[in-house]
Amino acid sequence: MIVTKGLTRQFSPRRGSEIVAVDHLNLEIQRGEIFGLLGPNGAGKTTTVRMLSCLIAPSSGEAHVGGQAVGQDDRQIRRIVGLLTESPGLYEKLDAYTNLAFYANLYEVQDVERQVKRYLDMLGLWGRHREPVVGFSKGMKQKLAIARALIHEPQVLYLDEPTAALDPEAAKTVRDFVEELKVEGRTILLCTHNLDEAERLCDRIAVLKTRLIAVDTPSNLRRRIFGRRAQVRLRQVTPEMVDAVRALPSVHGVEQADSQLYISLDDPDAATPLIVRRLVELGGEIQQVTEQTHSLEETYLSLIKEAQ
């Protein structure tokens, strides 16, 4: 659904100076996928979205959205994408209904009244559709902005920090709605600093710092950085136990911390029974066996550090 090859954007804030915001980005995002774009401030996430929305032109490289070429088929691309920016930019003196109707007419939606009511209902705003937006909470404004991005039924949806500055209840409402959109088969590109949100919503994520650092599923990225380790807690650990576990063919390494063993493995599910059996044979009293897990935050920070 979205393909970029060598996509690059440079800015020249002063004569003779040049800043590369996005550097030779190669991505392929599948139809119906929720794809997370992660990176620190200034990494090029918003610039990438602006290029894919045909709001700014690439300096070099190419991109296709829904089979249409950025820079050639911009009008067609704008018809099939929806965009939620970090700042909603609503017409606050107008009511919610008029805000959506205005954009519905711009997109030449056939039944404006029906479409506006549909999305205001879905997001729980119909009861206040004739109230000026200026009186809405941040969460209500964000919901309205999402409705605006969807009013023309886009195939592709770009969400730039959709839950930023929202309270937990409003943020959960937005996340639940994003999951519903995935069920409908929409392709969603999510830019976020909320790593827990990315973990829960995204099929795959890309870590960007001007250049692409890594792209994969969250679980695969964790394994790439940290591998897989079984954590075994015993009543007491002896040197013989450590040596015996280390000698097993499926074990890559063993670290001891007090009464716990951290055992590096390719496949903990297959190797753990053998490890447990060997420890029991040596008189080990096992209290707990788990797989050591690492958060997406740890993985992300490790990738960013490696890229410095």
Image (tube, grey):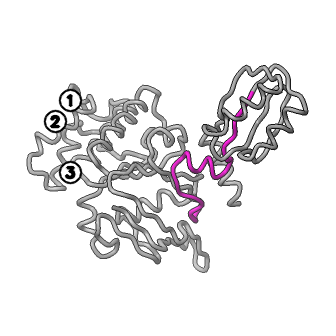
- Are the residues tagged 2 and 3 within 8 Å (C-beta)? no
Q: CA distance from mark 1 to mark 3?
A: 18 Å
Q: Residue at x 47, y 38 (%)?
A: 200
Q: Quadrant of the C terminus?
A: bottom right
Name the quadrant of the N terminus.
bottom left
> Secondary structure under badge 1?
helix
Mark 2 → mark 1, Cα distance in angstroms: 7 Å
Q: Earlier in the sequence, mark 2 or mark 1?
A: 2
Residue span colored magenta: 209-232
Other residues around mark 2 within 10 Å, as few (<14) / some (14–19) / many (≥20): some
Q: How many marks?
A: 3
* Residue extending furthest toward the left: 111
Query: Callout 3: few (<14), some (14-19), or many (20+) C-alpha neighbours within 10 Å?
Result: many
Residue receiving disc 2: 117
**Percent position of residue 283, x then y:** 82, 22
Verify CB contact (< 8 Å) between mark 2 and mark 1.
Answer: yes
Please identify the residue farthest to the front as the structure is shown: 281
Splitting the image into 4 quarters, where does residue 257 fall? Answer: top right
Q: Which of the two discs, 1 and 3, labels the residue nearer the N terminus?
A: 1
Residue bearing the label numbered 1: 126
Residue 300: image x %, image y %? 62, 48
Mark 3 residue type = His
- Amino acid type of disc 2? Lys
Secondary element at image label 3: loop
Compute the Cα span from label 2 to label 3. 13 Å
The residue indicated by pointer 3 is 152
Q: Residue at x 49, y 71 (%)?
A: 9
Q: What percent of the width, then of the height, locates residue 239?
A: 91, 33
The answer to whether residue 110 is above or below residue 293 is: below
Mark 2 or mark 3, earlier in chain: 2
